[in-house]
Image (cartoon, rainbow, N blue to C red):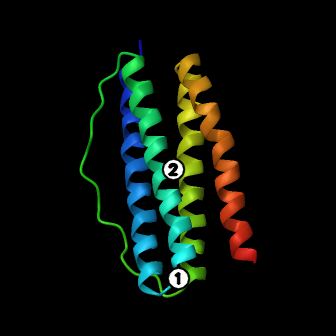
């Protein structure tokens, strides 16, 4: 059984993953309008990946006896002036996600919720890859 505190924190992240997906979809649209279909496609793939991350949180919450709570979200930014600015924002956003995942892991350990800690370990590893990939594109 999941604690109320962990349930709320995981639901917050579930909603943030959907927000992340919409940021990437908005970036994809902006890059497509700029005539950059390859970069747009990369962002659409990130959109799909973020939706898959949200789905993982959704199932984990339900499997642990929690209650999924979907919330409204802010509209993402619509325009990026360049590919570089979009990827710099993507990296900055992924750094925020990393911080949030680390906070969730700390909470899981404090709550002695080993099942959630094991679940979150995948995201800890994933965030290393997410940040490295965005940074690599920026450097190129």
Q: Position of residue 43 (x, y in %)?
A: 51, 66
Q: Closer to us: mark 2 or mark 1?
A: 1
Residue at the spot 59% in from the left edge and 17% down from the top edge: 114
Q: Is residue 78 above or below residue 100?
A: below
Mark 2 and mark 1 in contact? Answer it, CB < 8 Å: no
The residue beneath circle 1 is 36
Is disc 1 surrounded by few (<14), some (14 to 19) or many (20+) residues within 10 Å? some
The quarter of the picture where the N terminus appears is top left
Residue 124: x and y, percent? Answer: 65, 40
Residue 109: horizontal and vertical position, in percent?
Answer: 59, 24
Q: Secondary structure at mark 2?
A: helix
Q: Is residue 93 above or below residue 30?
A: above
* Residue at the (41%, 18%) spot, across then down: 63
Q: In the displayed structure, does residue 137 sit left or right of residue 98?
A: right
- Label 1's element? loop
Whichever of labels 2 and 1 marks the residue nearer the N terminus, that label is: 1
Q: In the image, is residue 1 above or below residue 10?
A: above
Q: Quadrant of residue 62?
A: top left
Residue 123 seen in this snapshot: yes
Above or below, 36 relative to 59: below
Which residue occupies 60% across, 57% down?
95
Q: Tell me residue 21's x, y (percent).
A: 42, 56
Q: Please indicate, yes or no, whether residue 3 appears anywhere in the rendered image.
A: no
The residue at 57%/57% (across/down) is 94
Q: CA distance from mark 2 to mark 1?
A: 20 Å
Quadrant for the C terminus in the image: bottom right
* Label placed on residue 49: 2
Report which quarter residue 132 is drawn in.
bottom right
């Amino acid at each position: 059984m999941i604690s109320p505190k962990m349930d709320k924190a995981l639901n917050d992240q579930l909603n943030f993953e959907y927000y992340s997906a919409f940021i990437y979809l908005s970036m994809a649209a902006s890059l497509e309008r700029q005539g950059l279909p390859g970069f747009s496609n990369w962002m659409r793939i990130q959109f799909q990946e973020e939706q898959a991350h949200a789905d993982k949180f959704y199932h984990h919450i339900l499997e642990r006896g929690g209650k999924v709570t979907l919330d409204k979200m802010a509209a993402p930014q619509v325009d990026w002036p360049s590919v570089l600015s979009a990827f710099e924002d993507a990296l900055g956003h992924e750094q925020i996600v990393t911080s949030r995942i680390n906070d969730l892991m700390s909470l899981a350990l404090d709550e002695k919720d080993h099942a959630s800690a094991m679940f979150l370990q995948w995201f800890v590893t994933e965030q290393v890859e997410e940040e490295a990939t965005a940074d690599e594109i920026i450097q190129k």
